[in-house]
Image: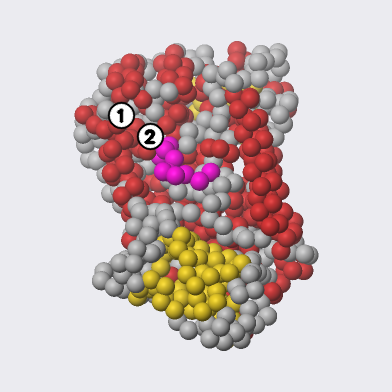
Amino acid sequence: MPSYTVTVATGSQWFAGTDDYVYLTLQGTAGCSERHLLDKPFYNDFERGAVDSYDVTVEEDIGEIQLIKIEKRKYWYQDDWYLKYITVKTPLGDYLEFPCYRWVTDEKEIVLRDGRAKLPRDDKTQILKQHRRKELESRQKMYRWKEWHPGFPLSIDAHSHSDLPRDIQFDNEKGIDFILNYTKAMENLYVNRFMHMFQSSWSDFADFERIFVRISNTISEYVMQHWKEDFMFGYQFLNGCNPVLIRRCTEIPKKLPVTMDMVECSLERNLTLEEEVKQGNIFIVDYEVLDGVDANKTDPCTIQYLAAPICLLYKNLENKIVPIAIQLGQKPGPDNPIFLPSDATYDWLLAKIWVRSSDFHVHQTVTHLLRTHLVSEVFSIAMFRQLPAVHPLFKLLVPHMRFTIAINTKAREQLICECGLFDKANATGGGGHVQMVQKAMKDLTYSSLCFPEEIKAKGMDSKDDIPYYYYRDDGIKVWEAIKSFAEDVIHIYYESDEVVCEDVELQAFVKDIYVYGMRGVKASGFPKMIRTRETLAEYLTVIIFTTSAQHAAVNFGQYDWCSWIPNAPPTMRCPPPTEKGTVTIEQIVESLPDRGRSCWHLGAVWALSQFQDKELFLGMYPDEHFVEKPVKEAMAKFRKNLDEIVNTISERNKNKKLPYYYLSPDRIPNSVAV
């Protein structure tokens, strides 16, 4: 009688093992094996991290194995089991790999195909076509779209983390509890004694050091020492944690009536302002998205304020970007003066602080929440709904969707919900952040997620003109490495453009993203269909880059750049100044966040800047969804390219007072998971 050797690998997560009854059935082209009991209670098989082997004998030849069915039957209590993979050695000595990397829960069964990636056109037998269809039908029932707020990209239909399918939950929910993590962060930073001191102002700038000194590091210390200086203010638009807003100014907007007389003393080339614009030396950052947004009113004891500034910047003869004019509102007028470097010291400083506060709000809500977290969740849901596990694009993308739906669900549960943690310290809490996302959706376009295209559209692509834009330089390198990897995988499975067009699952995936994620808005530029391998490579690069590199660039620098409170105030407690010559140091300190809000802010930026335990960085694929040698070779080439980028960045950063490392691949997690 034919005999098979079956090897079963259990995950190494906590509580990944099981003591339940586990049965296996082999299904081949010529029939099915009997149902074999692999493990029963107290046999100590399927322990956490274990690899167990069994001999399975069948009475008759079952032909080529097509499917494996695993059943778990409860012995005593609910005992979830994380199955990594199964390998089968056939009577002929061939080895078949069946990747799983899923939880087997309750008394359910899992049916696995071997690990070779297949497009829909590759399945010739009815049993494989049926398995493919059933998997997607089951997933579409579990992964349902839901509107969290009108105008938002749709998200997962789940009220809490525990409502999610087990496969996408965090291994340890306590590890991503925002309330617990923020409180723990404040304890670790020794600032918890201030956390309840709302309405209590700091005495002066030096007083902020009382919550800063214990958490100093290279960049944040440098920020503390130099935050008042114009060069540091300008540098952050290039390489801070929100380096996406600055654009080259091609025409001074009418709503910012800056004259040559105002800025003449800031210009260094003996040119008029108009000539400087024509030569490409003037840049602009406009916070129009904040105009009309309601400030946080959840605390009746503290009135909070927002502004929607416009900031004009200049590239000086040292190629440094420095501010030359700031208007704190969108409508020019006598009560909305244009502040200048030549103004009184505190006038100019307060104007810059208002810009930094506005930048913080746009960063948190638009750059970070909308353009990485919410967009990545759209990609994740569409992938689970439309791509079966055997599809090569599922295998390619699933490492980049790890825990994304879970972290977003937890955020909606605790952080950005009504009365959530976001309301405690942020002026855009209490609903302002919702208004911002709704307004920012009009600028969420496909081209804006194509990194090189977006950099060029902003006029920021020239290394000669703007030599110190490391976000651009490193981002282009990582983008190209990801694109090259995507192209290699595509060419393994799609032999022509025609095959791309015929892939109904790919087209359903793309359509789901357009219809539900982008709400079917034609102006978003998201494709409804993909017709060529070249377009598919770009599309996959957008997805992988957004979920990995883009999120890393705008997330993990938050502690570096925002821990010195005056450099990134999460709220302002006095309205923007409406005239010049009246600002005092006391007024500035009164405007800045009180002690309690400062501490909550500090706990937040510290917690958000931490990597996950056992973080998987770009190019690390320990779960072997792919089994084919050509793909593994493509992965090795990808890792080699990434290593070269790491070395280049490391060499550039040597001896720099302000190293830029957020887009170094060894610091880019594979997915949005924090």
Q: Is residue 92 above or below residue 300?
A: below
Q: Residue at x 66, y 47 (%)?
A: 636
User: Is 69 in front, or is 125?
Assistant: 69
Tell me whether the residue at label 2 lies in contact with that at label 1, contact meaning CB atoms closer than 8 angstroms.
yes
Query: For mark 2, what is the residue?
Result: 606
As helix, strand or loop, the secondary structure at mark 1 comes to loop
Query: For mark 1, what is the residue?
Result: 189
Q: Residue at x 58, y 65 (%)?
A: 97
Give the residue type at disc 2: Trp
Q: Is residue 62 visible?
A: yes
Q: Is residue 572 magenta?
A: no
Give the residue type at disc 1: Leu
* Left or right relative to 177: residue 3: right
Q: Is residue 121 above or below residue 157?
A: below
User: Is 230 in front, or is 339?
Assistant: 230
Where does the image place residue 350, in percent across and percent down from the top left?
41, 22
User: Is 109 in front, or is 602?
Assistant: 109
As helix, strand or loop, the secondary structure at mark 2 comes to helix
Q: Is residue 252 visible?
A: no
CA separation in Å, label 2 and label 1: 9 Å
Magenta segment: 608-617
Where does the image place residue 445, in percent across and percent down from the top left?
60, 52
Q: Main secondary structure of the magenta part?
A: loop
* Left or right relative to 434: residue 445: right
* Mark 1 Cα shell of 10 Å, populated few (<14), some (14-19), many (≥20): some
Mark 2 vs 1, N-terminal side: 1
Q: Residue at x 46, y 76 (%)?
A: 24
Asked which quadrant contains residue 656, the reply is top right
- Is the N terminus in the top left, top right, bottom left or bottom right quadrant? bottom right
Where does the image place residue 294, in percent across and percent down from the top left?
37, 44
Q: Is residue 60 above or below residue 516?
A: below
